């Protein structure tokens, strides 16, 4: 399965996963009602770009201040109300989607299995010496340990886990607690994210300002995929590479997080996300 930008208008072109139109017949709750109850204080969302191009950054920047992160396709299963989502699938309007821990489905209460992973994204303004971007927020989503996407894949259509939104603090940081995603055929292991200008506007992809993906480091993937539940990922990873991936083949330096931790203690993936604001 591939999320290559050349085919971003076709939501199912590159997936090795089975999808059915019935998966899109969900009626999410209206998050505007949640905003009216006081969630506006959570701040604004910084959405991953609308651009569906896998263009390389105009420079690599420095360790302290990287270049802006490349824009990528949101992929075929964003569930953000976009054409790629089938428009009727929009988890962003669901009550409770603003959350740090994204492992449990809001509706069913089922929890996704897998090695614990904390994702920390530091949002910085590359147009202002990489000053922290506070009050922004990020929507992230990724597949399960066996390569399924909630709301779409046949075995996870009733779930909405592994999707969530967080707003950035004064230091520009957003943090999510999740599980290490698996590797499915045709793609390097990755995590999707979008950035929006404000929480009140973060109700559909029409308002996002950036979309990109994290490329998970190979060493950590190999250790995680040796664990029970990730059996299919061992084969898929061996048949994949960053050099041939349809999204990361033009370079993934700005999209590869620093990985710390272990299988037993859980991993933390940390990335500075440059945005020209």
Image: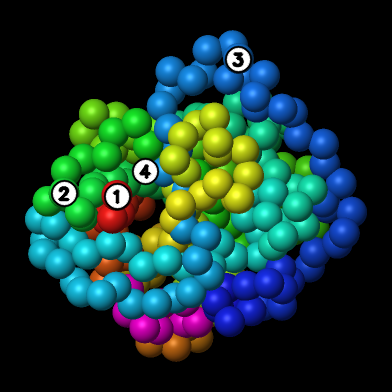
Q: Report which residue position mark 3 lands on.
A: 36
Spatial CA distance of label 2 from label 1 is 8 Å
Report the residue at 82% width, 41% height from top. 26
* For the residues bearing labels 1 and 3, Cβ distance under 8 angstroms: no
Q: Earlier in the sequence, mark 2 or mark 4?
A: 4
Q: Earlier in the sequence, mark 3 or mark 2?
A: 3
Q: Position of residue 117 (x, y in %)?
A: 40, 46
Q: Report which residue position mark 4 lands on.
A: 118
Q: Which mark is residue 128?
A: 2
- Left or right: where 175 falls relative to 140: left
Spatial CA distance of label 3 from label 4 is 30 Å
Report the residue at 64% width, 79% height from top. 7
Instruction: Tell me the magenta residue range.
Output: 245-252
Q: Earlier in the sequence, mark 3 or mark 4?
A: 3
Q: Report which residue position mark 1 lands on.
A: 277
Q: Disc 2 vs disc 4: which is toward the camera?
A: 2
In the depicted structure, whether residue 235 falls above or below residue 117: below
Q: Nearer the viewer, residue 65 or 207?
A: 207
Spatial CA distance of label 2 from label 4 is 28 Å
Secondary structure found at label 3: helix
């Amino acid at each position: 399965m591939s999320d290559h930008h050349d085919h971003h208008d076709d939501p199912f072109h590159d997936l090795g996963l089975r999808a059915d139109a019935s998966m899109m017949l969900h009626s999410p709750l209206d998050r505007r009602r949640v905003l009216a109850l006081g969630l506006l204080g959570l701040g604004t969302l910084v959405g991953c770009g609308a651009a569906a191009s896998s263009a390389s950054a105009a420079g690599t920047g420095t360790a302290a201040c990287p270049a802006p992160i490349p824009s990528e396709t949101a992929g075929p299963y964003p569930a953000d109300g976009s054409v790629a989502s089938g428009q009727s699938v929009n988890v962003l309007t669901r009550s409770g989607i603003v959350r740090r821990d994204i492992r449990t489905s809001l509706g069913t209460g089922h929890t996704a299995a897998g090695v614990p992973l904390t994702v920390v994204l530091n949002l910085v303004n590359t147009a202002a010496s990489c000053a922290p971007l506070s009050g922004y927020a990020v929507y992230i989503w990724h597949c399960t340990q066996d390569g399924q996407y909630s709301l779409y894949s046949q075995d996870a259509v009733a779930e909405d886990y592994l999707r969530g939104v967080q707003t950035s603090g004064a230091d520009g940081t957003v943090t999510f607690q999740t599980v290490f995603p698996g590797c499915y055929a045709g793609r390097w292991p990755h995590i999707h994210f979008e950035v929006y200008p404000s929480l009140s506007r973060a109700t559909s992809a029409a308002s996002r300002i950036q979309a990109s993906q994290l490329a998970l480091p190979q060493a950590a993937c190999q250790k995680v995929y040796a664990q029970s539940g990730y059996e299919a990922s061992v084969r898929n990873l061996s048949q994949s590479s960053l050099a041939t991936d349809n999204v990361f083949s033009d370079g993934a330096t700005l999209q590869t997080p620093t990985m710390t931790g272990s299988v037993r203690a859980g991993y933390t993936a940390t990335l500075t996300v440059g945005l020209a604001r």
